[in-house]
Amino acid sequence: MYLSRLDVRGFRSIKETTVELERDVSVLIGENSAGKSNVIEAVRLLTEPLDGRRSRYLDADDVFRGPDCSEAILTASYRGSAEDLSPYQHAMAADLSEARFTLRYTPPALDRLRGQVQWVAGNGADGTDPQPKARERLRHVYLPALRDAARDLGSGAASGVRVIIESLLSEADPIRDADRQPNARQALLSHAAEHLGEIERHPVLARAAERVAAPLKRLTRGAYEQHVGLGFEAMSMQSLARGLRLRMADLGLRPREIAESGMGYANLLFIAHVLTKLEAAAEADLTVLLVEEPEAHLHPPLQALLMDYLHDAAAASRTRRLDGQWRGYVQVVVTSHAPSLAAAIDAGDLVAFQRRPIPEPVATPSTDTVEPAPGFALEPAAADWARYETAVVGVGQLGLPEADLRKLNRYLNATRSALLFSPRVVLVEGVAEALILPAAARVLFAAGSADLARFLGTVLVPIDGVDFEPYVRVLLTSAGGARISHRVAIITDGDQQNRKKTGAERIANLNSVIGGLGAEGHARVFASATTLEPELLAAGNEAAIWAAWRKQQPRAWKTAEEEVEAEAAGLARSTKFASRMSEAELRKGDFAQDFLEAAGDAWQVPGYMADALRWLTQEATQ
């Protein structure tokens, strides 16, 4: 059983969207203020906290600010086997494929203080939930982004430690005597009481008690004289756990207080502690672990290990069978801004969020002069309406060919996975273009200009080849009218890359893919006549080009220059240059670095590259 889908309407930044979640782990990625945390908040409202201490309730500020939104409606759909869903028969959808619960919130009227909350089970034909207790079997644990692991693993961890100890004791002594506590449990408490009793009898503690007793004796001797002793709390499993502290250190060293460890490792210990507690307690059919920005304080290798651990923990919860009444499943939903974390999981587990601009509302003149009652406000004016809404694209729901998904999982390293975080992306063939393009933007656009700012907010991805199609499909496939990116520039060479397909054929094929996705307004291919370096030469950068060649081949460069410059200007010259560069086996990345060093800030950007940059940095439209 797992939370398979969230339908959210009129909630915070979300006017209306559907979020499809994976069974074990889903990672919500995207730009700031795109709505990731609002989806986390929706799950918190639709499920009960595991510890029963609810701190999140709906209020009027949660309703999307728009002319046609007067309420917030949150729906959670759950999938699973018939056995898993048996406690939720009253909430089954019409096709019996999933259980469904809807939370509807209507803000208070102008003369009221409280809004209206309504729960609906199933299709909601009668608008009620006849068995609200069933929803208590669906819970969550929420880990906010700004966690203080050292604090949370202090005395606050006692309940988790107690649950883990009790679980281990139950495994050690599964048959409970009806007239007394289990033997293993009593043995532990007796052991603790015996050793703590030895401490209580230490002479120093006895003298400390006498110091306190002296003034107390004087204060109470005129009534009922009191006596003082120092000792530990009456021994119980709760008091024992409260006195324990989780400690940690490098392997081979004696564990120390958590505050003495690094923040990153403390956060890992905290997450491990939470998952261990979930496994030990398992007091729910499904617990959704909501983790905001788990990459906090973690360097990239630890981020990859964490995601692998979370995935395995969720998968393991589906293989164990509990003897009690609960199913004990765990599902993980993560928000993240870290490309390295996104690269550590299957691409199909990624859900991309973006801000979609809403057209400016047209204010309608009004002659209404009604004044609000004291303490209340009138409906928000058009100027207060939201300017953005959340759009969501789940990579796993794009219907991409399996071959493309396999390629993406191989391609999306920490650098390339950044393309899923930005609405603007430029795809280039290799490292040379990736080095040249940012410098070209600074030549074309004035410092501090909006165009340069938009370029700096663009993700630049070298794909190390010409196989652009998988990237194009994942970025531009529409899901409910939304795409991961709304502007994608593809910069490629127009020369023949292999014997099977010419540059013109590749470009035509790319344009065909873009057209088939209905994304002509969102993507464009910009191609050179030959390759990057000949185009830099043809643009009028001869001095810097030959200086770069001379840097790699101090003696042979002059012969190459004479042969190339002997050709007539135009395509023949560019073709000759490309041929000589290939024969010389120049390192393209080093050549680009040397070119920029020689060119400085004043050089000519090739036309196709300038066109790409100008198109890419146009004002955003959705």
Image: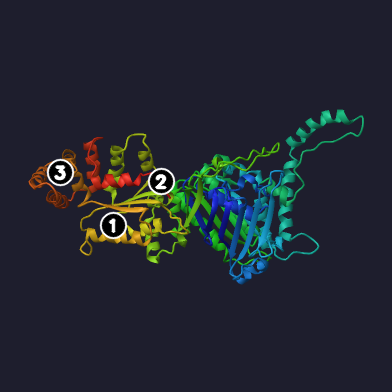
User: Is tag 2's residue or tag 3's residue first in the polypeptide sequence?
Assistant: 3
User: Is tag 1's residue or tag 2's residue first in the polypeptide sequence?
Assistant: 1
Mark 1–mark 2 Cα distance, whole angstroms, equals 27 Å
**Is residue 1 shown above or below 37?**
below
- The residue beneath circle 2 is 620
| Disc 1 and disc 2 in contact, CB within 8 angstroms | no
**Scheme of image coloration:** rainbow
Say which element carries label 1: loop
Circle 2: residue type: Ala
Task: Indicate the position of residue 281 as horizontal and vertical percent values.
Answer: 65, 58
- The residue beneath circle 1 is 466
Mark 2–mark 3 Cα distance, whole angstroms, equals 45 Å
Answer yes or no: is residue 273 visible. no
Q: In the picture provided, is 520 more to the left or to the right than 296?
A: left
Residue count near mark 2 (Cα–Cα under 10 Å), binned few <14, some 14–19, many ≥20 = few
Task: Indicate the position of residue 4 as horizontal and vertical percent values.
Answer: 55, 62
Answer yes or no: is residue 159 visible. yes
| Disc 2 and disc 3 in contact, CB within 8 angstroms | no
| Disc 1 and disc 3 in contact, CB within 8 angstroms | no
Q: Nearer the viewer, residue 483 or 279?
A: 483
Nearer to us of marks 2 and 3 is 2
Nearer to us of marks 1 and 2 is 2
Q: Nearer the viewer, residue 460 or 616?
A: 616
* Quadrant hosting residue 132: bottom right
- The residue beneath circle 3 is 553
Task: Indicate the position of residue 415 as horizontal and vertical percent values.
Answer: 38, 49
* Quadrant hosting residue 213: top right
Circle 1: residue type: Val
* Quadrant hosting residue 369: top right
User: Is tag 1's residue or tag 3's residue first in the polypeptide sequence?
Assistant: 1
Mark 1–mark 3 Cα distance, whole angstroms, equals 28 Å
Nearer to us of marks 1 and 3 is 1
